[in-house]
Image: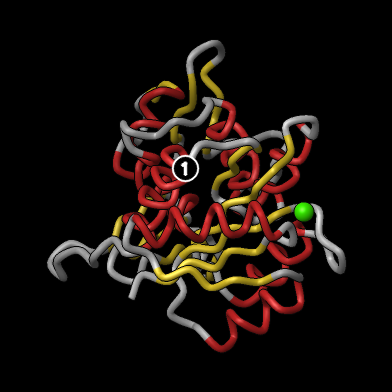
Amino acid sequence: MKKVLVLEDEASIRSFVVINLRRSGYEPIEAETGEQALELLRQNPDTRVALLDVMLPDIDGFEVCRRIRASDSRIGIIMLTAKSQEMDKVTGLMTGADDYVTKPFSPTELTARIDALYRRTGAPAESAAAFEIVRGPFRLNTRNRTLEKNGQRVKLTQIEYSIMKLFMDNPGKALSREDILNSVWGRDYYGELKIVDVNIRRLRIKIEDNPTIPTYITTVWGFGYKWGA
Ligand code: CA
């Protein structure tokens, strides 16, 4: 079953989401509080995508996201953010979410986002023949979808992994933000280009020697980014 965790304390929004997910062939797992969501994920380790509301009665959605990421880098996480809280998007992504959807959202938009993330988190392993890309101090294993820098594992989300793979497949090539969005999120993705910048900011913190003076993922001003190792 395609399990999706739905963490939302407002019953009306939760049931709206749940009904639409069922209609699209998913098995929603409902949680009203952050603690309940974490417990349900422990009971359902095969859940591949989690939708997390930010404003909750106990711990907030960002904290839930952080706690999930502390033990699971593979699950896809989408934050449900309020329109008025522009900063929530960036905060959510910086705490490890893969995407965000702004309330009020349409069922079509939400399902498209979940479909995209679901496809990516379940991407099949590639052939054993060429499953490593080595550039500079980095070693990307496309079979396990893992990254090492100088032999040390760097924990990546699935989105970060996909961005790293795109860069390491295209060394020295300037990639526009649109190229990155289309390649990593898919052409049917509804989101904004800003999500590319936020993910790259987060990735730089993980992989650069000094994230404020990036040397591996460099900025191509007014265009996009380039891999330099
Ligand atoms: Ca709420």
Q: Residue furthest right?
A: 58
Query: 223 or 97, which lies in front?
Result: 97
Quadrant holding the C terminus: top left
Ligand 1 rendered quadrant: bottom right
Query: 135 or 107, which lies in front?
Result: 107
Q: Residue furthest bottom?
A: 43
Quadrant holding the N terminus: bottom left
145 is higher (above) or lower (below) than 81: below
Rendering coords of residue 104 (x, y %): 63, 36
Rendering coords of residue 160 (x, y %): 49, 51
211 is higher (above) or lower (below) than 96: above
The picture quadrant where one finds residue 155 is bottom right
Mark 1 belongs to which amino acid?
A: Pro
Residue under the point 46% across and 24% down: 177
Residue under the point 34% across and 55% down: 24
Query: 97 or 177, which lies in front?
Result: 97
The picture quadrant where one finds residue 3 is bottom left
Would you name the residue on which mark 1 appears?
107
Crowd rating for badge 1 (residues with CA inside 10 Å; few <14, some 14–19, many 20+): some
Q: How is the image coloured?
A: secondary structure
Looking at the image, residue 98 sits to the left or right of residue 92; the answer is left
Residue under the point 39% across and 62% down: 22
Query: Is ligand 1 less than 8 Å from the beta carbon at label 1?
Result: no
